[in-house]
Amino acid sequence: MSYAIVYDSSTGNTQRLACAVKEALPAEEVVAFGRVGDVDPAALVAADRVYAGFWTNRGDCTDQMAEVLSQLEGKEVFLFGTAGFGADQTYFAGVMARVARHVPESAQLVGSFMCQGQMPESVRTRYERTAQAQPAQAARMQQLIENFDAAVGHPDDVDVAHLQAAVKKA
């Protein structure tokens, strides 16, 4: 079965997952691998299955990835993504449901995977500054800082192993 891997990565987290997907699949069956905007749309049409990776942008994928997903008529689709917030399966399920809405009804969703992704240090700095400047927000900012700290190093080797197991299962 031929496949394409297309991903959207802002900080490298989703790119790491895309490489892990590629490692888990037969090399001779890949018709395309690359970032959104770099993958030839004809390659996506030629593939039997499309593995689409995204970073979470306001609880959804980016508009560019949504456009790619909307063009996967009749394809088998496996979605994978990262989110800076989370480590919570309920949150991840909500993100995945929003992203899946971009996939045409004629496509078949054959699997999905999400994990937490590390955020840039500037995010933590912004939380710290907000906590200092707005004392009423300090408790909320502390929660966000704790989430930030928990995300450091993700996706990690365990995340990658879980993704590869989900890919092989699909």
Image (cartoon, rainbow, N blue to C red):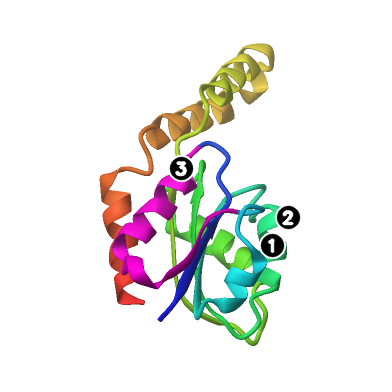
Left or right of 126 on screen, residue 34? left
Horizontal arrangement in the rendering, residue 144 relative to residue 37 (left or right): left
C-alpha gap between disc 2 and disc 1: 5 Å
Q: Is residue 57 left or right of residue 89?
A: right
* Residue 79 in view (yes/no): no
Report x, y in % for residue 149.
Answer: 41, 29
- Which numbered disc covers residue 66? 1
- The region drawn magenta spans 12-35
Q: Is residue 56 magenta?
A: no
Q: Relative to 64, does residue 25 appear above or below in the rendering?
A: below
Q: Residue at x 60, y 58 (%)?
A: 39
Q: Could you say where residue 132 lies in the image, as x and y percent from the top left?
A: 62, 12
- Image quadrant containing the N terminus: bottom left
Q: Residues within 10 Å of mark 1 (few under 14, many from 20)?
A: some
Residue 153 x %, y %: 35, 34
- Residue drawn at (50%, 67%) of the image: 4
| Residue holding disc 2 | 63
> Within the image, what quadrant is residue 104 found in?
bottom right
- Give me the disc on residue 13: 3
Q: Quadrant of residue 63?
A: bottom right
Q: Main secondary structure of the magenta part?
A: helix
Q: Amino acid at mark 2?
A: Asp
